[in-house]
Every structure is written in C-alpha cells, then in structure tokens.
Image (cartoon, rainbow, N blue to C red):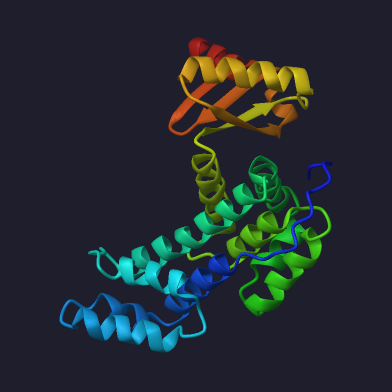
Amino acid sequence: MTDATPTPVTVPSGLMHDIQTMAVALQEYPALSRALTDPATAMSSKTTLIDDLFAASGESARQVLKEAIGRTWESNQALTLWVQAEAVRAGWQWAADTQTLSQSIDQVFSFGRMMYDDHELREAVTDRNVDLGRRQALVRELLTRTMTAPAVAICVMAVGSARGTIDAAVRAFVHQGAKQANATLAVVTVARSLDDDQKARLTAALSKRLGKSVIVEEVVDPAVLAGVRVECGSDVIDDTVQARLQAARRDFV
C-alpha cells in the first residue's frame, strides 16, 4: 500500500453511488435487465420503469440508464458491465474533481496487488458464501484510513463487480482511471522497488517511446532477478534476466 497520506475527502459522490445502485439491481435481478432490453417493449414504458424503480436516485443517474437502454446489447451482462463502468467513471471523475486522481489510481492498483499477495484476505473478500454487504464493509473498514474516499469506493465496487473476478475488476477499473487521466497504464515488474528518480526516468522513457502520457504502476517480483518487464496494453517489453535465461534455455534445446 502507498505510504502517502490521502487528501481528506468528505463529500461522497452521489452520482457514483446512484449509478452503482442501478448496476447492482441489474446484476441481481436478471428479469429487470431483460425487461429493459426487450425490443418489443416501448421505450416510454422502459423509461417509466426506470423512473419508478430508481426514484430515489438523481435524474443524472437515471439518465445514464435511459441512455444505455437506447442501445443494442449482445447480452444482459454487457448492459450491466456498461452501467457499472459508468459508475466507475463517475468515481474517477470524483477523484479528479478533488485533485486525487493520480493518488487514487495508485491506491486502487495497490489494492489489487494486496488481493493477489494476501491469500487469506482474498478468500475473506471473495467468498460468495458470505453476504456481499459484509465483504464490502470489510474492505471499506480496511481501507478508509489509508486511501482517498474515491479509491475506497472504487475498491468496494470491485468486490461486487459483475466482471467475474476481483482481479479482472481492479484491472479494468485502473485502466479506466488512466484513461480518465488521458494516459496509458504501464505495469512494470522489477526485482527491487524503484526509487523516485528511477521511476521518473522510466516514466519519461516510456512516454517518449509510446508518444503519449504514461502512468507507471510497479510490481516487485524477485524472480525477475534484474532488468524490467513492461506491460502496456497488448504491448510487452521484457528485458529481465529471467526472460534472457529462458530464451537461452530454448536456444540450447
């Protein structure tokens, strides 16, 4: 986890909460998503249903869902994922509005690494035999004192994501955050943690090579021995000793 003290944020994002409420409803009640995507049902009936079901949500949030049902979806799951992505986008906008976007991206990425490294915590957070609300409350309690409020909300959302696994959710959410920052996410694997100067030089080099702004997130893995492995979207640059040794073994086979 990052050692940086989060900037205090006390005003919650009502838009993010309201959109996420709709995403959860679509996820938990498939009949609802079927009704909203049924081409035989008049659009006026669908919008009335949205207004009735989500009357407690703001008009801006309801408008997101109304826009969604005006599109053609290959599956009900695709609709749910799109609405959830809009909730995440609202969360990143909340971070941007409170000048914590870069910090929040780092923190959500760190949460994903924590889930990967701490098997006991991962099991507690992902056990579907435990009520979702309890699992989300555990994450909220764990992170509130060390993360920005937008980062906490996005991590909590990952616990109940429709994306299947918490890893897939965090990965998708962090990429959305980088996009919100008009940058590309580069995941850098190194044997030892980079210092600030090394990270700055690597970020500058990657930005120059790719011709765009880059956000570098670091993974420390002693198995790489030395060098660096960079994953940037579908592009992979592997200049680690581990990769060179593997290549050498293949050459001798």
Residue 123: percent from left, percent from top:
70, 64
Residue drawn where x is 76% and y is 69% of the image: 138
Task: Residue lying at the far bottom in this picture: please name it.
Answer: 52
Front-lying residue, 140 or 190: 140
Residue drawn where x is 46% and y is 19% of the image: 211
As drawn, 141 above or below 219: below
Residue drawn where x is 18% and y is 82% of the image: 42
- Image quadrant holding the N terminus, namely top right
Q: Is residue 229 visible?
A: yes
Front-lying residue, 182 or 109: 182
Residue 64: percent from left, percent from top:
39, 67
Residue 190: percent from left, percent from top:
69, 25
Residue 34: percent from left, percent from top:
30, 79
Residue 53 quadrant: bottom left
Residue drawn where x is 75% and y is 63% of the image: 10
Residue 38 quadrant: bottom left
